Image: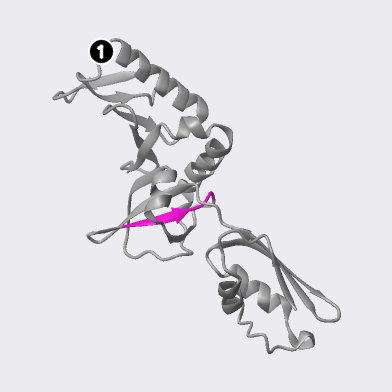
Amino acid sequence: KIQFSGIDTILEADLKKEAGLTGAEKWGRLNKDVLLHRITSYPIVAEARVVKKYPDKVLIDIIERKPVAVLLATVGERTIPMEIDKTGTVFKVASKKDSQALPVVSGLSFQTIRAGMRVHKQLVPLFMQLDLLQKKNPALLSEISEMKIEQKKYGGFDLILYPVRTKIKVHTDSRLNEDRLQYMMLTLDVIRKLNLNIQIEELDVRGGTASYRLRGETDE
C-alpha cells in the first residue's frame, strides 16, 4: 500500500512512474533509498521522505518546487519560458497562466535547457530574494512586469527593471530587496507627479541615489 502526502500539482501516477512502482512489488524487497533517489531525481520534487511501515505500507512525503519567476531562456533563436524556484533550478515549462502570475526574468542564454538544470551560482541570490519578496510584499513585486539580467564585463550582473505602470526602465544592481524597490517606486511616483514621464527614458538607482537619462541622450 503506497500513500503519498504533500502533493499539490504532481499526479500520483507520475510519481509512481518516476519511482518505478508498478504495484506488483513485494514490500520486503522494496529499497527505500533507491525509491528516494528516483523520486528526488524528478525535477518538480524539491525534497522527499520515504518510510516503510510494517507490514505492508510505504509512506512517501513530498515537498514540491515552488516557482518564484518565469525564466525566459534564450536557446539559439528560440525563447523558452521555464518555471524556476528559489534555488535557481528550472523544473518545468511555464504555461501562459504562470507567465501572467509570476515575475518574468530575461537576459540569459543557454546552449540547451532542460528541467532539473540550475543557473550559475552567482544568480541564485536573486531568486532567493524573489522568494522573500513574494512572501513578504507580493504587491510590491507585482509592480514589475519584467527584470532583465545584464551581465557585467568583469563578472557579476546588474538588473534592468520594467515597471508595470510606466515606460521608464530602471537600472539597478543585483541587490533586489524591498527597500530598493520601494525607493524606486517612490521616485517613479515623483516623476509622474512632475509630468516627466515622457522625457525620461531610464532611471538609475545603482548608487543609492537616483539619476536619470532623457530620451535620445546617451549621458545622464
Q: Is residue 104 left or right of 128 when viewed as pictured?
A: left
Q: Is residue 154 left or right of 38 when viewed as pictured?
A: left
- The total number of labels drawn is 1
Q: Position of residue 36 (x, y in %)?
A: 67, 72
Q: Position of residue 184 (x, y in %)?
A: 40, 23
Residue 85 in the magenta stretch? The answer is yes
Q: Position of residue 131 (x, y in %)?
A: 54, 42
Q: Position of residue 193 (x, y in %)?
A: 32, 11
Identify residue for label 1.
Answer: 195
Q: Is residue 104 left or right of 4 when viewed as pictured?
A: left
Q: Which residues are magenta?
A: 80-86
Majority secondary structure of magenta residues? strand
The foreground one among 93 and 90 is: 93
The residue sitting at 75% across, 79% down in the picture is 1
What kind of residue is marked 1? Answer: Asn
Q: Is residue 132 visible?
A: yes
Q: Residues within 10 Å of mark 1 (few under 14, many from 20)?
A: few
Q: Is residue 119 visible?
A: no
The foreground one among 68 and 74 is: 68
Placement of 60 over or under 144, stated as above or below:
below
Q: Is residue 48 left or right of 104 when viewed as pictured?
A: right
Seen as rendered, the residue at the extreme top is: 194
Q: Quadrant of residue 111?
A: bottom left
- Quadrant location of the C terminus in the rendered image: top left
The residue sitting at 50% across, 47% down in the picture is 68
Q: How is the image coloured?
A: one colour
